[in-house]
Amino acid sequence: MEEIGATVVAVYMRYLHDVLKQANMCSMVGFIDPATVSANSGTIADRSRLVAARLQKTDGEQIFMMPYNPGRHWILLIVRAKKETVYFLDPLPGHRVVDEEAKNIVNSAIKMYNTHIARAGRKNVIWKTLSGTPKQPSSVECGYYVMRFMRDIIMDPSLGFENKYAKGNQEASYPQEAIDEVRNEWAEFVFQIIKQGNY
């Protein structure tokens, strides 16, 4: 298995968007393109504005999945703007902390969102680490794990990810079949796009 980039993750997010459409859940879950927010994608201010613009296109109840790569590692942030809460999921084992740059981007974006909806908001955004996620077995699976996290979250219509991945619910690594399922869905989606000439 090899490391994957933002384009691979974004294509899978597009596939998941189609899954959400079929389940009539688009008003519940949105996505933020990792290529626009990850490290080396512009200034923190520029990236914050992009995230804020995405948050402002919703009624606020929607959660936004934001895969983020601070440099050779994928994590997943789930932004719940109306509740001024961000969830942090990291497939690496051990006590992990949120990248400061990612935190600054999202905190600023939520402040801009609050200004947009004319709300004073909290002094500080609430950050919750969901440490009960499956953990990658080596150094290259993080992107696949983040894609699988997103898949598992949207396959639960109640969006009960906070309880599912809470501390103490820690799981072992995903079985290879679970990662292969994501890879196969990605490949089939790309194949259909090429077959239809929609690229």
Image: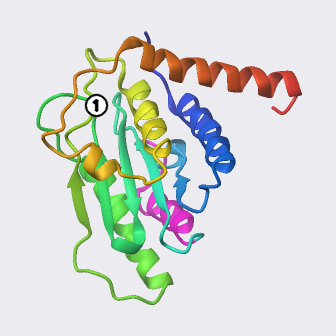
Is any part of residue 108 visible from this angle?
Answer: yes
Amino acid carrying label 1: it is Pro
Q: Quadrant of residue 191?
A: top right
How many numbered dots are placed on residues in this image?
1
Residue 13, percent across and down? 57, 39
Secondary structure beneath dot 1 equals loop
Left or right of 36, for residue 138: left
On the image, the x and y values in percent for residue 183 come to 54, 19
Q: Residue at image x 65%, y 55%?
A: 24
The C terminus sits in image quarter: top right
Say which residue appears at 55% left-offset and 47% top-offset: 33
Residue 112 higher or lower than 167, as above or below: below
Q: Residue at x 28, y 22 (%)?
A: 136
Q: Position of residue 87 (x, y in %)?
A: 30, 53
> In the rendered image, which residue does mark 1 sit on?
91
Horizontal and vertical percent position of residue 129: 21, 49
